[in-house]
Image (cartoon, rainbow, N blue to C red):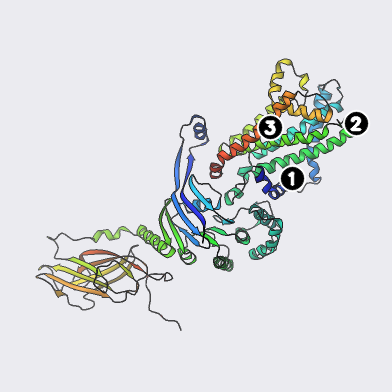
Amino acid sequence: MSSIIRVSGLSKVYKHYWGPRSLLKEVIFGVVSHHQQIALKDVGFELAEGEAFGVVGNNGAGKSTLLKILAGTAFPSSGTVRVTGRVTALLELGAGFHPEFSGRENIYFNGALLGLSREDIRAREKEIVEFSELQDFIGKPVKTYSSGMYLRLGFAVATGFDPSVLIIDEALAVGDQHFQKKCTDRILGFRREGRTLVFCSHNLYQVKTLCERAMWLDKGVVRAIGPSDQVVEAYTDELRQETKTSSQNGNGGEPPAETADSWVSEAVMTGANREPKSEFLTGETLRLAISGVFRSGFRGRPAFGVSIVRNDGLSVFVTSSIQANAELTRAGEDTYAAVLILPELQLLSGAYLCHAFTTDQDGIQAYGGKFIRFSVKSEPFDQGLVKLDHRWE
Amino acid sequence: MLTILLDNKYLIRELVARDVRSRYIGSVVGVFWSILNPLVQLILYTVIFSLVLKLPFEEDNSAGRFAEYLFCALLPWMALQEGVTRSSRTFIENSALIKKMRFPLEVLPFSVVMSAFFHQFLGTFVFVLILMGNQTLNVNLFGLAFLLFIFQILMIYGLSLLVSCLNVFFRDIAQILGVLFMFLFWVTPIVYAKSRAPESFRWVLNLNPLTHMVEAYRFVFLGSPTPSLAGLAYWIGFCLVSYYCGIFILRRTRNELVDLI
């Protein structure tokens, strides 16, 4: 398969002039009178024919700019962009319609812009009108359309002229549920027909299911590019990290040995084969070997506690050896050890933080502990936090 | 450039037809306004300059002759003024198209220019009929008007491209144009004959390329005054320079232009 989109070294800089006067000053006297906003920096990728490519990232990451450049409505500041074949685009809610023209005239207008002959357009007109469900309004100027009608026509036109590349920016939430379903079906149909799709959405699930490959843009720079589930995961991990509150920071690390009566001296996370490990697959065995020091000042029965927190601060699971009524193994004079085993890890994809701590017989207070980061990968279609035991009947 | 316009001839036709139609939608006499408009101006100027101020054109000082001279100049002038002034806003007015799809920018000012020219053409057609009735038409040469049309369109299109691009960066351009055209109207011999202007003022008129355009139109329709070849060449040169200037400016500014609209 040949590459249908080739982008290399693409950068886009927007110049923001402080006002028309500074622009004039710059033009005439050559005094730099603007500040630059870098929207894209050295972006490069290639798409093969028939591939579906997702673009994810925060607002202002440059997604829309990239899609505009691919669609040909903006131009790169440097680098090359080559797109072969007929490209149609749905950019930022809506299509390019002349407000004074009727819906039908706009269909012809758009078709003409794509280089189609009148006959070609006429051949497709009926199907486009039908898809948009605007039969009664197609002769009216589009300025009289509601926003939903406008979007429906936009989607029908963008997908109705047999494009080889379809670029969609956040436009899948078109109209009511019935129409959304139609849009999704049509896009899936496009995929089956082997057309190329470039797709940008905040709906990460859509990106994951529709696209084979994805790119994560962060402040105009490519952070990751690859299989869409991996890229989306890397992106969601970071999103969680950002929203995580600082509540964790209070009880971290090892307490000073002089004042504490107990602390965890070592915690090692391993797989079933006891090799240290920090990346797990859902369903694998996770072993956490903990050893801790309990000084004579420690009252009661020595116990360990473990809590697992997702990286956005969500508490997933807390347990202790007391709850399980488990005895710690004495490993030295005041050293005790225990192994926590999670035989079939039910966690789904994500980055997690494991906190191993010492606790007293009430199992409530947590003393100085160790933190271990680990991550879990699961099947692409599994969504959520845990895989609940379930069956269908 | 030409191929871009040819590729989009359907688009241009639609835009022009739309533009012409939209201006008269809901009006009773419709497209006749494009003839009535210059006609009213013509009558007004003729009454004031010929009947009230008694300004003669050449040796014949009848009001009818004055009107004929005036009409030759007024029609291309109006096309120029309308085409350039309206082009200056065309990119901003059509931002919805430019931002949402790969749109050939060249097409927008061109369709404005052609819509302005359509009115000139219609007016000229009526004008030629009147001249035939008066038996004052320069029958041998008036076909050359088509040649003049071509150069005139090149000029208007070039200037339109220029102002439509610049107006995106400096929105003052549209305002400046109003003042500029007011000034240009009087330094172009439209309501008077160049030969009637005082010697000391004539260099200004000769410097103005539009003077030579007006004289060329008068010559092909009425047979006088005989234009100077140098002046004609100067005007044609100006047309070509305007055209290439416009294309050059569009090429240079296109990338940044779409970001600013």
Kindly give the residue lying farthest to the front in the view shown. A1
Find residue A145 and report its horizontal and vertical position in percent: 65, 57
Q: Do circles 3 and 2 both sit on a common chain? A: yes
Rendered position, B259 above or below A329: above
Mark 3 — residue? B239
Kindly give the residue lying farthest to the bottom in the view shown. A393
The answer to whether the residue labelled 2 contacts the one labelled 1, judged by CB atoms less than 8 Å apart, is: no
Q: Is residue A384 visible?
A: yes
The answer to whether the residue labelled 3 contacts the one labelled 2, judged by CB atoms less than 8 Å apart, is: no
Q: Which residue is rendered at x = 53% and y = 44% of the image?
A: B259
Q: Name the chain letter of the residue that bears numbered label 2.
A: B
Mark 2 — residue? B135
Question: Disc number at residue A246?
Answer: none
Q: Nearer the viewer, residue A313 or A194?
A: A194
Q: Residues within 10 Å of mark 2 (few under 14, many from 20)?
A: few
Q: Is residue B174 visible?
A: no
* Whole-number angstrom distance, CA of label 3 to CA of label 2: 32 Å
Question: Disc number at residue B20?
Answer: 1
The amino acid type, in three-letter code, at marker 3 is Cys
The amino acid type, in three-letter code, at marker 1 is Val
Mark 3 or 1, nearer chain start: 1
* Whole-number angstrom distance, CA of label 2 to CA of label 1: 32 Å
Find residue B23 and report its horizontal and vertical position in percent: 73, 45
Q: Nearer the viewer, residue B206 or A8?
A: A8
SS label for mark 1: helix
Say which of marks 3 and 1 sits in front. 3
Find residue B9 and report its horizontal and vertical position in percent: 70, 48
